[in-house]
Image: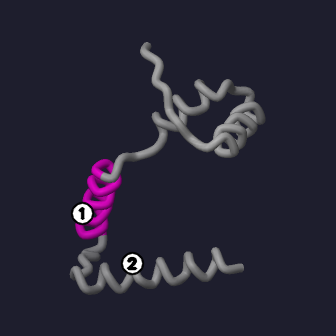
Amino acid sequence: MSDANVRIPEEAKDRLAAIAAAEGLSLRAYLARLAETLLTPAERAERAEKALAALKEWNGYAPTAAEQEDLDSELDRRLAEVKGR
């Protein structure tokens, strides 16, 4: 296994180290686990495509591009509302 140097602000490193320690992990182990669990944009898109296909097969749900855009906008609005609290 090779090592890599990553430059991040000291505050971010300290925060990540504290989170890792709280989970009983070293910072290195925590970051490795985090990298294994996060999806790339391509992986997220593939999963979304599969989910839409499954929904269409299961119950005929097939939103148009405009409907998807409206749903995305509504989700963004609700997330912004929650963040503002």
Query: Residue lying farthest top?
Result: 1
Q: Which residue is mark 1?
A: 53
The kind of secondary structure element at disc 2 is: helix
Examine the structure image and report whether residue 45 is included in the region drawn in magenta: yes
Q: Amino acid at mark 1?
A: Ala
**Which label's residue is closer to the chain start, 2 or 1?**
1
Residue closer to the observer: 57 or 19: 19
Examine the structure image and report whether residue 30 is included in the region drawn in magenta: no
Examine the rendered structure and indicate whether residue 46 appears above or below residue 8: below
Q: Amino acid at mark 2?
A: Asp
Image coordinates for residue 3, horizontal then vertical, percent: 47, 18
Mark 2 is surrounded, within 10 Å at the Cα level, by few (under 14), some (14 to 19) or many (20 or more) other residues, namely few
Residue closer to the observer: 1 or 65: 1
Image coordinates for residue 55, horizontal then vertical, percent: 30, 67
Q: Residue at x 77, y 35 (%)?
A: 22
Magenta residues (range): 42-58
Mark 1 is surrounded, within 10 Å at the Cα level, by few (under 14), some (14 to 19) or many (20 or more) other residues, namely some
